[in-house]
Image: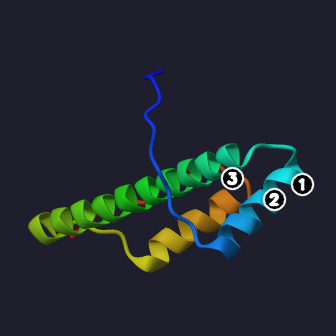
Amino acid sequence: MPSPATTSLKLDLELKKRVQQLASARRRSAHWIMREAVEQYVSREEKREQFQQDALSAWNKYQTTGLHATAEEADAWLGKLEAGEHAEAPQCHL
C-alpha cells in the first residue's frame, strides 16, 4: 500500500457537524468517515465511468459491424437466467 498523502478538505460547519455526529455514532474518527466516503464515491464513479466507456465501445462496435441481438432476444435470455435456467447469451446477427 502506498504511503498516505495529506490533503485538506474544507467543509461548511453544518456538514462538519454531521460528519462528527456520524463518527461519534459509529465509534469512528471523523477522518475515517471522510476517507470512507471519498473511497466509496471514487469507486462508484470509476464503475460508472467504466460502464460509460463499455457502452461507447459497444455502440462503436455495432456501428462498425451491425451485429446485434434484439430486445426480445435479450429479454428471453434474461428471463431464463432469472428463472434459474442455464442459458447461453443470444447470438449476435445482422
Say few, some or many: other residues with alpha carbon within 10 Å of mark 1 (under 14 / 14 to 19 / 20 or more): few
The amino acid beneath tag 2 is: Leu
Residue type highlighted by circle 3:
Glu
Front residue of 45 and 77:
45
Q: Residue furthest front?
A: 13
What residue sits right under mark 3 in the picture?
A: 85
Instruction: Give the structural element (helix, strand or loop) at label 2.
Output: helix
Name the outermost residue toward the left. Answer: 64
Residue drawn where x is 72% and y is 61% of the image? 19
Which amino acid lies under the numbered mark 1 shown in the image of this protein? Ala
| Residue drawn at point x = 24 percent, y = 66 percent | 56
Q: Residue at x 42, y 60 (%)?
A: 90
**Does residue 88 show up?**
no
**Residue at label 2?**
22
Q: Which element is circle 3 on?
A: loop
Marks 3/2: CA–CA distance: 44 Å
Dot 1 lies on which element? helix
For mark 1, what is the residue?
Answer: 25
Task: Find residue 79 and report its horizontal and vertical position in percent.
Answer: 64, 68
Locate residue 6: give its quadrant. Answer: top left
Give the label, 3 or 2, closer to the camera: 2
Q: CA distance from mark 1 to mark 3?
A: 45 Å
Rendered location of residue 65, percent (x, y) = 13, 64
Q: Are marks 1 and 2 in contact (CB under 8 Å)?
A: yes
Q: Could you tell me if the residues under marks 1 and 3 are in contact, i.e. CB atoms within 8 Å?
A: no
- Say if 10 sits above or below 37 in the image: below
Q: Of residues 46 and 2, which is closer to you in this image?
A: 2
